[in-house]
Image (tube, rainbow, N blue to C red):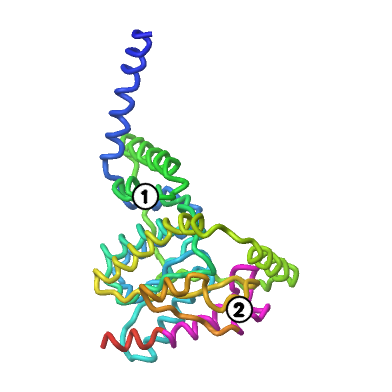
Amino acid sequence: MKRFIKQTGLFLVPVLIGMICLFIIPVNKQFSYWFVKGECNNKANWIYNRVFFLEQETDVIFIGASQTACAVMDQRIEQDLQDFTGKPIYAANMGYCRGGRDIQYVMLKEIFRQKKPSVVVIEVTEDEPKKSHPVFPYLADTGDLFGSFVFFNQRYFQSLFKGLTLRFEYLKWILAGKSVPSTENVPLHSYIHNTVVASPGLIQQNRLNWEKRFRRHKNGLIRNIELRYSKHYLSKMVGLANENGCKPVFLYLRESGSRLNQPLLFDYYKSIADVILLPDPIFSDPENWSDATHLNDNGAIKASVCISSELLPYINHLY
């Protein structure tokens, strides 16, 4: 038995040392963002190039999930704000598919390291996501990766494994003498165009799903535990913006069938930042949806016009 324990220890020690070394070695950010290529219309690669590669400043940042990517026409908003103010103002849609506040936080950290946005608009939906974003460990620094042990993070150990995998692949990349392909002619804007109009059946099913959800009652203690992870990162995001002299603002983008004019956590959001609520007709018109959860071009135009108007007071305050 002692011999078995000794042999096991001799095997595990170098493995543990190797894992520690992998976590200590910093990963090139370009590799991290390139590693998840193909995800979300290759949005991570665009975000890297827009933030790190292009010299163009970003005055207004929109950060969130695919609802932001499909609802915020950053080029139109940018032009509207320039027309309103007569000043050179630049906007960028950093919406990345699927919910998860941790990935938005690490992206926002990189944005503030490279740029000096004046306003950051953070997407909120009917309710907060309860889990870590599956791509978070590939973009997170080692400190943020280990620091994601927040009660209750259901994907903590899975994230550590993914982070280790990324670092192992990066080491292989370095040893092979490879380099990440450079991207040329990177566009300044990344709104995802879509002219499809959702079928009435999709809209109806989404409404029925929300009615079922509203009928379910969850224990208040359990719900508070589930929300701690998202709230932890929301407060960090708002704090990060404030520390950098940037105005944080929440933007409510709901699904087609929920019929909630305010998010469930409206009072919480209001306690830490302003909240932009768009007119209900934008969401209640079935012609404005490409599917049950994402606006199409028609809906995004209407939403973006309203967003420009709502942002104007914050922009005027800068001058």
Quarter holding the N terminus is: top left
How far across and how far down the image is residue 281, in percent? Answer: 61, 84
| Mark 2 Cα shell of 10 Å, populated few (<14), some (14-19), many (≥20) | many
Would you identify the image quadrant in which residue 236 lies? bottom left
| Prevailing secondary structure class for the magenta stretch in the rendered image | helix
Whether 298 is among the magenta residues is yes
- Calculate the distance from the C-alpha at mark 2 to the C-alpha at mark 1: 34 Å
How far across and how far down the image is residue 120, in percent? Answer: 36, 73
Q: Range of the magenta residues?
A: 281-310
Q: Residue at the spot x=68%, y=70% of the render?
A: 207
Whether 180 is among the magenta residues is no
* Total numbered labels: 2
Q: Residue at the spot x=48%, y=50% of the render?
A: 134
- Residue 113 falls left or right of residue 230: left
Would you identify the image quadrant in which residue 312 lies? bottom left
Which element is circle 2 on? helix
Which element is circle 1 on? loop
How far across and how far down the image is residue 219, in percent? Answer: 55, 57
Check disc 1 and report the residue beneath it: 148
Q: Between disc 2 and disc 1, whose residue precedes?
A: 1
Check disc 2 and report the residue beneath it: 283
